[in-house]
């Protein structure tokens, strides 16, 4: 499949601020525990903080959660070069939320 070819030729895309090449261990460590669908070019980095243990503790405290899918686009690595952020051309990203996740 195309996914297999890309997986064998490519590497985990890391944000430029890490200032290093991807390592084999990044396929696990630079991935959220929530990832279930292919399509994102990078991990939503905010999700890296929510380990399985943290999610379990939140659940035990009665915190309601829902699953969303965010396919991070290549534009996430594009630096803001405009002096005024309103002039920065943003790339789009795909996301989905299941109807039962909505109030």
Image (spheres, rainbow, N blue to C red):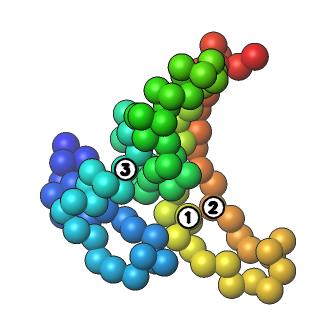
Secondary element at image label 3: loop
**Image-based side of 68 in relation to 41, left or right:** right
Q: Considering only vertical position in the picture, is 92 above or below 71?
A: below
Q: Does the image show residue 76?
A: yes
Q: Considering only vertical position in the picture, is 7 above or below 76?
A: above
Crowding at dot 1, Cα within 10 Å, few <14 / some 14-19 / many 20+, comes out as some
Give whichever of discs 1 and 3 has the lower sequence position. Answer: 3
> Of residues 33 and 60, which is closer to you in this image?
60
**Image-based side of 14 in relation to 88, left or right:** left
Contact check, label 2 and label 1, Cβ < 8 Å: yes
Secondary element at image label 2: loop
Disc ID at residue 91: 2
Image x and y of residue 36, in percent: 37, 33
Give the quarter of the image for residue 29.
bottom left
**Image-based side of 45 in relation to 22, left or right:** right
Image x and y of residue 21, in percent: 29, 77
Q: Nearer the viewer, mark 2 or mark 1?
A: 1
Q: Nearer the viewer, mark 1 or mark 3?
A: 3
The span from disc 3 to disc 2 (Cα, nearest Å) is 21 Å
Image x and y of residue 4, in percent: 18, 48
In the picture of the structure, the residue carrying the numbered disc 1 is: 76
**Residue at the spot 63% in from the left edge and 61% down from the top edge:** 91
Give the quarter of the image for residue 102.
top right
Name the outermost residue toward the top: 100
**Residue at the spot 54% in from the left edge and 20% down from the top edge:** 60
In the picture of the structure, the residue carrying the numbered disc 3 is: 31
């Amino acid at each position: 499949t195309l996914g297999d070819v890309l997986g064998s030729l490519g590497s985990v895309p890391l944000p430029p601020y890490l200032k290093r090449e991807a390592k084999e261990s990044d396929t696990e460590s630079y991935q959220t525990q929530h990832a279930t669908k292919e399509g994102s070019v990078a991990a939503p980095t905010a999700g890296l903080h929510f380990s399985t243990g943290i999610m379990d503790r939140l659940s035990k405290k009665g915190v309601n959660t829902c699953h969303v899918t965010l396919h991070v686009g290549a534009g996430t690595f594009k630096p803001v070069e405009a002096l005024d952020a309103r002039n920065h051309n943003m790339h789009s990203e795909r996301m989905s939320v299941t109807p039962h996740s909505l109030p």
